[in-house]
Image: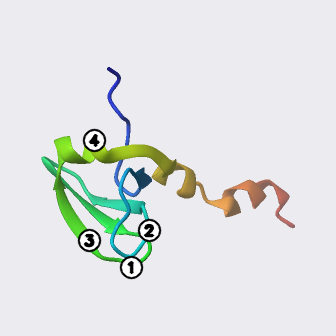
Amino acid sequence: MERKVFQLGDIVLMKKNHPCGSNEMEIIRMGMDIRIKCVGCKHSVLVPRAKFEKNMRKVIRSAAESSADPSDADAGTENS
């Protein structure tokens, strides 16, 4: 079975909804335990890594995608 790939700052889709109704979580701490924060109500939960990997469906938005600065694309169009 292939290991799921995720990193700090990713927004992930979980199998079960949070009590507020959202099932999107942001990874805010990684180690043996993973701290995730609900995107809907901002409540954070510390989950053992094994349980997190079992209950995570997929990565919705990667931190690598959102860190790409759109102002870098305009660097070639500067007026001198």
In the structure shown, which secondary structural element does the residue marked by tag 4 occupy? helix
Amino acid type, label 1: Cys
Q: Earlier in the sequence, mark 1 or mark 4?
A: 1
Whole-number angstrom distance, CA of label 1 to CA of label 4:
22 Å
Amino acid type, label 3: Ser
Residue contact between numbered discs 2 and 1, judged by CB atoms under 8 Å: yes
The residue that mark 2 highlights is 22
Q: Quadrant of residue 22?
A: bottom left
Given this view, does label 2 or label 3 mark the residue nearer the observer? 2
Residue contact between numbered discs 1 and 3, judged by CB atoms under 8 Å: no
Q: Which mark is residue 41?
A: 1
Q: In this rendering, would 25 be left or right of 36?
A: right
In the structure shown, which secondary structural element does the residue marked by tag 1 occupy? loop
The relative height of residue 65 versus residue 69 in the rendered view (above or below) is above
How packed is label 4: few (under 14 Cα within 10 Å), some, or many (20 or more)?
A: some
How packed is label 1: few (under 14 Cα within 10 Å), some, or many (20 or more)?
A: few
Question: In this orientation, which residue lies closer to the viewer: 28 or 24?
Answer: 24
Whole-number angstrom distance, CA of label 4 to CA of label 3:
17 Å
Whole-number angstrom distance, CA of label 1 to CA of label 3:
9 Å
The residue that mark 3 highlights is 44
How packed is label 2: few (under 14 Cα within 10 Å), some, or many (20 or more)?
A: some
The residue that mark 4 highlights is 53
In the structure shown, which secondary structural element does the residue marked by tag 2 occupy? loop
Whole-number angstrom distance, CA of label 2 to CA of label 3:
13 Å
Q: Position of residue 6 (x, y in %)?
A: 37, 43
Q: Position of residue 31 (x, y in %)?
A: 17, 49
Amino acid type, label 4: Glu
* Screen quadrant of the N terminus: top left
